[in-house]
Amino acid sequence: MELRDRLLEAAEQAIRASGLNKTTTKEIARIAGCSEGSLYNHFQSKEDLLLQVIKGQLQSYTAVLFKLPARKGTRTVQENLEEVAHAALDYFYLSIVMTATMFTEPDFLARHRQGFQQRNEGPHRSNEIVTSYLRFEQQLGRVNEAVNPRSVADLLLGACFQHAFHLQFLGEDESEEIRKQFVSNILQTLMQGVLPQ
């Protein structure tokens, strides 16, 4: 494993154990088995390292989201949303602890928020992508024209976020079977209003 990857893993481990405030670059370097100076050959700061950890966690989720526009009119709407829900659950479960640490550092959060705004990125973008997909499906007659696509996106992703939050808060893991059942139950309920009558 390359040093950069070891540092990313070490940062995640240290921040999960101690929080962003108490995690030092010295501790990250110790866990990664390198000198503190080596860390700065790969990352500008502890903050930069945290952002890279979060971006790494985000990759699988964004890959699914970016495929969604091309999925319009293919498979079923439920199958497409199911793929999004599973990716969202995985991402939220992994990232919720890391992103929560940003809220303990108001200055860091403000800089991070400003960077997101400049790059037109942020957590709201996933809701926008799902909304756009649902609008396309509405135009194709595969989604009930009476529903609000943004509300459907918010309900789906909000349910996934809350589920991941509960698991992390309670310190619980769940089997793949239970996760699939959760997604199935959410989508069966949503589809009652989403599919054309």
Image (cartoon, rainbow, N blue to C red):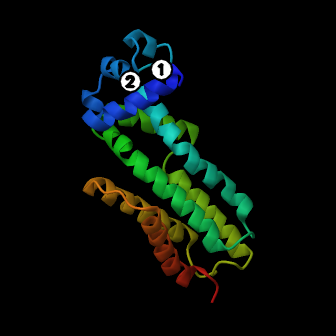
Q: Can residue 155 be seen in this view?
A: no
Residue drawn at x 63%, y 66% is 80
Q: Quadrant of residue 14?
A: top left
Q: Looking at the figure, which quarter contains the C terminus? A: bottom right
Foreground of the two, 194 or 86: 86
Indicate left or right for 173 with 6 as reference.
left
Q: Residue furthest bottom?
A: 197
Residue 108 percent coordinates (x, y): 36, 32
Residue at mark 1 to residue at mark 2: CA–CA distance: 8 Å
- Mark 1: amino acid: Phe
Q: Do the residues labelled 1 and 2 touch (CB within 8 Å)?
A: yes
Where 155 falls versus 168 (above or below)? Answer: below
Query: Residue at 42% of width from left, 45% of height from top?
Result: 95
Q: Which mark is residue 43?
A: 1
Horizontal arrangement in the rendering, residue 23 relative to residue 70 (left or right): left
Q: What residue type is labelled 2?
A: Lys
- Residue 46 disc label: 2
